[in-house]
Structures are given as structure tokens and as C-alpha cells.
Image: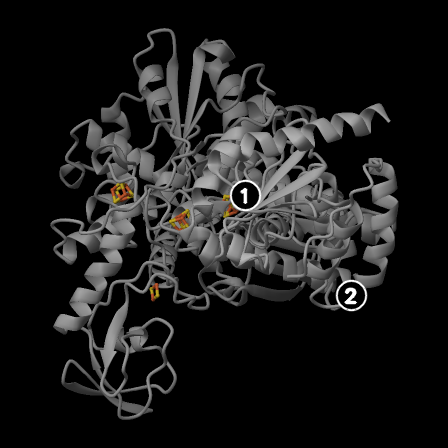
Amino acid sequence: MAAITINNTPLTVPDNISILAAAKLAGVRIPTLCFLEGLDAIGACRICVVEVEGAKNLVASCSVPVTDGMKIKTNSGRVREARRTVMELLLSEHDGDCQTCERNEDCELQKIASDLGIKSVRYEGQKTAAHLDTSTPGIVRNNGKCIKCRRCVAVCNITQRVGALFPQARGFKTVIGPAFDSDLAGVTCVQCGQCAAVCPVGAIVEQSHVQRVWDALENPKKTVVVQTAPAVRAALGECFGFEPGTLVTGKMVSALRRLGFATVFDTNFTADLTIIEEGTELLTRLKTAILDKEPVALPQFTSCSPGWIKFVEHFYPELIPNLSTCKSPQQMFGALAKTYWAQKVGKKPEEIFVVSVMPCTAKKFEAQRPEMNDSGAQDVDAVLTTRELGRMIKQAGIDFAALPDDNFDRVMGVSSGAGDIFANTGGVMEAALRTAYEIVTGRPLPFDKLHVEPIAGLEGIKEAQLTITGTVPEWSFLENVTLSVAVSHGLGNAEKVIERITTGKASYHFVEIMTCPGGCIGGGGQPRLTDDAKRKQRIKAIYKEDENKKLRKSHDNPKIKQVYGEFLKIPLGEKSHHLLHTTYTVRERV
Amino acid sequence: MPETTTCACGGTVTEEQMSKQLDAVLAEYKSKPGALIPVLQTAQTMFGYLPDPVVRKIARELDKSYSEVAGVVGFYSFFSRYPRGAYLVRVCLGTACYVRGGNEVLSAMKKALGIDIGQTTPDRVFSLDIGRCFGACGLAPVIMVNQDVHQRVKPAKVGDILALYRAKSKEEIHK
Ligand code: SF4
Ligand code: SF4
Ligand code: SF4
Ligand code: FES
């Protein structure tokens, strides 16, 4: 432990933590721009400088550790002046037209400038040339706003192991972006949006579908239905000042109705459906391997996370046979809304306009994949991020906090708690086990509250083993088989799991991968800035939503039974094959 | 960074030949740590520039992202993405040349060639770069065109100098 003082207040903090972390413990906020929790501090921006007694120069608090006896001042005149200088230099090169910027009122640069009381900029800087990169379906980059903090570089290269963004050229001409002067579409970007989630300014944002949705809502020829991903309800409140982890399911449904959506459905419904299809697929693969002793690709990898899919297509095409052929819940929903539900309400596929609200930018990419047209029209027409929905609610002048709770519409709005937990790392696996175990043994999963503890939480790679006993006759070949599963989130961790498998260090039957750290609750389209504390709060909220439901297992959902009875007939059947399953594409790795 | 050694033989290598030559280099370095810069240097020396397929291949073989390799290529002025022109024009911006109008010479040169520093004219006759002292300070401002030194250059004279080489390059083609 180190005894230090911060602004004359003595305190004892763990050795070797940064001054920034120590200040946080002391309840002192220091502004930061380049620093990002969980990654090595690079000390690039110097907005976080503090004064250390005895040191000649101010030090960057994010990258200097505390030492015993250190006396730190975070708020001296010298510190304020230095921070102001840093900020004024940044602003002198910044293409700052806040009123028309995506990040207005949600911008770290703007906030810090305002906190520092910047009234004028003393330096004459050359503005960075604005280049708008709209080459990909999910992400928009604007170099003119970039402050070169390099958070996106670290996240894309280290957390996600994609490496789409690096500093290019040198000196004043340095831009943070894809190779040379190419656009994102020219490199292997998987559209996860983690760069957009950590960018402190308006330099990386989602491709907005807000106008598209307003237009559809005003088009008398369209019946507009909306689906909401499970992770949205645990984060949308943050756009309106609610504490992270506040569940706003009922208010969200109310808000969607007031925005004019004719029918409000839930992606959770097709999450339940995914479990039936993907669970059956897994059991079929196991049967082929264990009973028929025929070659089959194992482990089976989950396929609900479109960034992960694109990652495999670019970097591990040899694993494509291991990907579940199931479409993601978003795409199953689109395909069913324009066929099954369209028939119910007497509409043609092209008369229905499907909007999804997703915590994700890669879902925008997924929706426009050419194979996602199985209903006869593009299955999902527009994808809003959680942030975009927040903006639409504000545009409409809806007082979100004052909204009453409302319920999803029937049929495709009914879901089990297993659908909810698709939102967080470990959730898809747990949901699948709840159903698969019961199919095979006729008994519920034998765990407290049906939770599979070893695969919950924020550990990067989690594993669990489950020995199956007391099987029903049909599945007796699984008697005494130990099912081995793994769960990981963040593509860097996914890469490590793949390495464990290919080097023979581990072997699994089923692996859940989510692209974003923490799973969808930490998605690239969620309110900023997601840190581990927020991830935990959102996950807690999701488990609460699950536990509060009477329905906890996908196969118990009566509306799922109904959709099979009326339309799909059997899991992995002909209709399912056509509407709910998909194929993948080998892509260039460079 | 070592000095640029531009392949001035005028010969062109096909992409296929490049790929083969590169394979040998990659085989040598592949397993060594920190291979990226030496491989890029060798390729630059071999081909005189780093065409896009070469950059991509290096990225692929060394298991690096294309954007990362591009970042390195763009950072060091030793690397060039385009073939250098037959004549490399270097304008000295060392202190003596600078105070005696080197910068004006550079501006005139940029204007006359229609290119920026580090670029090559579309007809591949000239490339433009800057230098830091060619050891002829007494006769500043100085420019070098390949190995020829031109002294006391006036911005207005830039066109004449270039015309000289343009004529020469036409002769070469006729031969
Ligand atoms: S990035 Fe921030 S400071 Fe810059 S224009 Fe946008 S809101 Fe304003
Ligand atoms: S969207 Fe993801 S993969 Fe693409 S640049 Fe951003 S962080 Fe990298
Ligand atoms: S794009 Fe955003 S995160 Fe990336 S360097 Fe620029 S300001 Fe930082
Ligand atoms: S936050 Fe410390 S240097 Fe940028």
C-alpha cells in the first residue's frame, strides 16, 4: 500500500496503481481523452496532467503510478493552465461545429472544454481535412473530428484483433484510419462498432437509419413493425439519465407506440426460436458424431453475432462448417415477420417494413447481406442502434421518464427469460443448455435458478463441463457423455479460444462467441461510454428480467409452439431451412 | 533509414515475378521477430517501390493487418508506394538553402511538376523530394537531380532545369 495525498487529503491506496486510478478512489475526477479502461495507457493526449510535489514537469496521471509519500495536486493553477493549453491546441485543429455533430451533448471533448471553462482559443491551427467515409453499412468515419487519441486503434487491434485502424502517414498529415487512404470497406473491418463506442468525439459513429424509419412511419403503404433486441431494455434508460442497469422495457414499448409503430414485437421471441433451432442442430451434430460415428464439424459455434461471423469469414474461413447455420434472432424475426405474420395480417412481404432496435452496428451490416432476402424482400429494412432510438424519442418530444409501462404485442412479442439473457456473455449458452438438457433428460437443468454459474460474468474465456445422466430413450447415446462448452466475448478472446481448439489444448462441443466485450449489453450501438461497471449493472438487470418471468425456457414458450404448429412444422424442417438458416461467405483476410 | 536506392534500370518487373522474388525474402524472415521493417526495406530496394499487391502480400504472410503495414509504409519516407520517376529531384531545405530561398524553389518546383513532396509525375519522369544539406552550402540554394548538383537555383529557372531532363528522357526512349 502507498500513503499519498491528493489535494492535501491523505489516503492509502494499493501500490502501483496509476495516479488517475488513485484519484478515482479519492472521489477526484481527472479529465481523460486517450485513456481507456482495460488497455495500456499510452499517454498521448496529456489532458490528464497533474502536479506531483518534487517533480519538475507535470505528469500524465493515467500513465504514472503512485509511489509511497507522493503528494499530488489535481487542481492547481498550473494544472488548470496546462490542461487549458492542451484543450485549446486540440480545438484549434478540430472541425468543431457542435450543433450539427452527432455527438452534440454526448461528447467528451465538448464536456471537458466546457468543464475547463474555455471561452476562446488562443492558437491559430490548421483544421484537419474532413473526409467522410460512408463506405460500409454500419460505420461512418469523419477525420475532421478526429483528435488522434487512438482509442479506436487500441480497441480494434487489441480488444478485437481486427487491426482495421492504425495511424497512417506522419506529422500533421497523420490520420487514424484504414490502410493508406482507403475507406473501411477496403479493409477487413467486421463492423462491430467498438471503435464508435469508445471514440470520445464525433469521428466514428453509426450509419444512421433514423430518417429511413421516419419516412417509413409516414408512408401509408407500409405496415411498420419493430423488434427490440434484449440488450436495449437494459441500456436505453441511460440516454435519458437513468442509472445504468435500469430496466425500461415497459417505457420502451410505450415510446415505440408513440413514435407510430403499428406493432411492437420483441427479438426475444426469435431468440427463443433460435434456441430451438440451434439446440436441435447441436443435438443432431452430436448424434452424427457419437451415434452414427460419422465426420461432422464440432464444436458448433453460435452464429447470432454478425461481427463474429464476418471475423470468421475473413480470418478463419476453415471454421465456417463449425458455425451454426442458424440466422441471428434479428434475421429470423425479419424472415418470419414478412411471411408467417404477413400472412396472418393479410399483407405481402413488400408491404411490411421491419425495423430492429439493436445494441449493435454490425446488425446494420447483417441486415443488408445479400442472402438475407428469404421472405422475398429484404427481411429487415432498417436497424436503429439503442442510441438512435434514444435520439428519435427526443426528436419526438416524448418525456421518456413520464411514460407508463406497456406490453409487447402478442405472437412475436412473447418470450421466455432464456430470450432475455441472449443480451449478455454466457446467456445464449445458458439458454441453449436449459432447453437441450431438458430435451435429452426430460428434467430441468439442475442448477440454482437455472443459472450456469461458471459461464456467467466478465472473465474473457469461460468453460463448463456437464455430465449427462438419466437420458430419455431417444437420446440414450448421450448417457454419461460429458458435454464440454466454452464462452467468450470480445474477438481477441475468441481468437484465443480458437487457438486452444486448433492446438488441441481444449476440445468442446459447443462454443458461444459474442463480438463485443460483455456481450450485446456492451455492443457498439449502446449509450456511451461502456465500462465494466456499466457492463455488470446491465447484466444484472438482464438476469433480473429473466428471473422475473414465469416463462424461463425457450421450449416452454407457447407462441413458439404455435409458430411451429401453424407454420414451421418441425425444427430444422423444410420451412426452417428456407427461412431461418443461412450460408456464409469466404472473405479475403487482408 | 538508409539512403534510397532506386532501381534506375528502367526495366519493369511483372507482378508474378515480384511475387516470386518476395517469396524468397519472406521465407528468410518469416519466423524472425520484428521482420516487418526488414522485409519492407528489402522489397523497396528490390522493386524500387512497394506496389499494393506487395504490401498486401507482406501483411498476409507476416500475419499483420494491412492497415498496420500501410501505417509503417506511410511513416518512413524511405518507402514509396509508387514507382519513382526516372529523375529524382531533391530540393535542399538545409539551413543555408532555406534562408537563401530553398522554400521558394520548392514551391516553384511543385508548381512546375504539378506534384507534392513524395509524389511522381504521371509520365513517371520526375519524382520530388526534399533533402537536408548536400554539402554545397556555399552555393545555396541547391537542388539535386539524380546525381547532378544544381547550384544557386532561382525559382524562375526551375522550368529550364526540368526541360533539360525532359529532353534527355525523350532521347532515352528513342534509343
Ligand atoms: S466532436 Fe464534440 S466538440 Fe467536436 S463538433 Fe462534435 S460535439 Fe462538438
Ligand atoms: S467497427 Fe470494429 S472492426 Fe471495424 S474498425 Fe471499428 S473496431 Fe475495428
Ligand atoms: S477516431 Fe475517435 S477514437 Fe479514433 S483516434 Fe480519432 S478521436 Fe480517437
Ligand atoms: S488520458 Fe492521460 S495522456 Fe491521455
Q: Whole-Å distance between the Cαs marked 1 and 2?
A: 34 Å
Q: Residue at position x 84%, y 38% from top?
A: B13
**Relative to A27, A441 lies left or right:** right
The numbered mark at residue A178 is 1
Q: Which circle's residue, 1 or 2, is located before the other in the chain?
A: 1
The x and y percentages for residue A523 are 43, 47
The C terminus of chain A sits in image quarter:
top right
Amino acid at the residue labelled 2: Gly
The numbered mark at residue A504 is 2
The answer to whether one can see residue A519 in this image is: yes
Amino acid at the residue labelled 1: Pro
The x and y percentages for residue B170 are 75, 25
In the structure shown, which secondary structural element does the residue marked by tag 1 occupy? loop
Above or below: residue A236 compared with residue B24 = above
The N terminus of chain A sits in image quarter:
bottom left
The answer for which chain carries disc 1 is: A
Crowding near pointer 1: few (<14 within 10 Å), some, many (20+)?
many
Do the residues marked 1 and 2 share a common chain? yes
Looking at the image, the residue that sits furthest to the top is A221
Q: Is mark 1 within 8 Å of ligand 2?
A: yes
Q: Quadrant of ligand 4?
A: bottom left
The x and y percentages for residue A298 are 75, 52
